[in-house]
Image: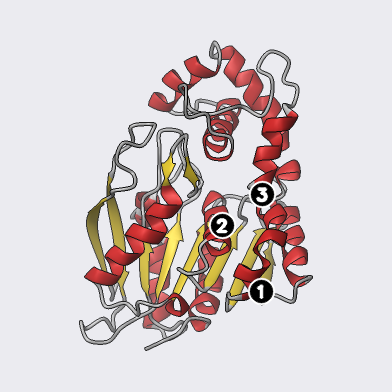
Amino acid sequence: MLGEVVRTSHESRCLRDNPLGDPYVRDLYVYLPPEYDGKQRFPIVMLLAGFGSTNHSIAAWSPWKPNTIQRFDRLVSEKQCAPAILVLPDCFNRWGGSQFLDSRGTGLYQTYLADEVIPFVDAEFRTIPDREARAVAGRSSGGFGALRLGMDRPDVVSVIASHAGDAAFELSMRPMLTSAAIAFEQAGGLEAFAREVPTAGPQNASQFDAIFVLAASGAYSPDPEAFPHAMLPFEPRTGALRADVWRDWLAEDPVTRVELSVDALKTMSLIYLDAGNRDEHGLHFAARMLEGALSAHQLRVHYDEFEGGHRGTSWRYETSLPHIIHALRKE
C-alpha cells in the first residue's frame, strides 16, 4: 500500500455517561493518500460500518482479498480516483450498532460524528475544513447513517452515499419482527435476551434478527427509563404490531424523511445510491423507492444496481468512491 493508515483515538464528551455504558474513548482510523505531504489539503470521506461491524472490520487485513482501504489506495495509486482522506469512526454499541443517530436509549452518535469526529480530524490532519469537501458513505446500517447525516446535518457534509442502506421499513424491517419475537421469547423475554445474547453474540438467524431489532428499537423507539432502554414495536406475547411504536420507527425511515429534508438534500452536490438486485432484505426495492422520491424533487442522484445480494459488497466502493470524490471540492 502506498498511502498510510493512522490509528488514533478520540475521547468523546457526548458519549460519556451514555445509557448503555459503552466506551467513550473510541479508536479512529484515518487513511492518508500517497500525495499527503503535510502541505497540501485533501477532502475527506467518512465511511460508516454496517450493523454488527466496526471501523476495525472495514480496516481488517486478509491474505485473500483487499479491504476497502486497500481498494481505495489502489484506485488512487493508479490515478483512477482523485486522492482523499478516509475517516473510519467507531459507533458500535452493546446491541451491535447505534444506527448513527442521537438516541436517549443508546447515546448521541450523530452528534459524535458531526461535532466531535469531524472537528478532531480537521484539527489533526490536512483536510479542507469545509462541508463542500466532505462526504459520508456507508453500507447497510452505515448507509442509513450516511443518509440521515446528510438529511439532518447538511452543515457538515455535501455528498452522501448509501450502499443498500436501511430504508422502506415496512418492506425491509417489518418481516424481521416475527423472527425477533420468537428469539426474545425463547431467551426468556427482552430483558433476559438483552443481558445474555450480546455477550456471546447471536447464535442463529432468529437471534441476529432479534439483536438488530433491539438495536433499532434503541435508536428509533428509545425508553430511557428502564433497561434495555428500548420499546419493541410489537407485543412480546402475541407478536402483534404496536402501532404507536411502529409509527416512531417509520418516522426515522429515510424514504419517509425525504419530504421533510428536501431543503437539506438540495444542498448536496451528489446523492449516491446502490443495491444488489436480489438483496435478502429487499433493500434494492427500498433503494428504488428512495431514488424515485429523490428524483421527484430533481435532486442530484446517481443510482447503481448490481448483480448480487446484501453481503460481501465492499467491492462496490471501487465504483462509488470515484463518483463521491469527484463531487467534492478540492484545494
Q: Quadrant of residue 269?
A: bottom right
| Count of numbered circles on the image | 3
Q: Work out whether mark 3 precedes mark 1 in sequence or the reverse, and give the earlier one.
A: 3
Looking at the rendering, which quadrant does residue 292 occupy?
bottom right
**Residue shown at 33%/47% (left/top)?**
14
For label 3, the residue is 253
Q: Which circle marks residue 302 in the picture?
A: 1
In the picture, the quarter occupied by the C terminus is bottom left
The reply, left or right, for residue 107 in relation to residue 166 is left
Q: Are marks 3 and 1 in contact (CB under 8 Å)?
A: no
User: Residue reaching furthest top?
Assistant: 188
Q: Is residue 130 above or below residue 306?
A: below
The amino acid at mark 2 is: Arg
Q: Nearer the viewer, mark 1 or mark 2?
A: 2
Per the image, label 2 sits on a secondary structure element best described as: helix
Judge from the rendering whether residue 140 lies leftward or rightward of residue 9; answer left or right. Answer: right
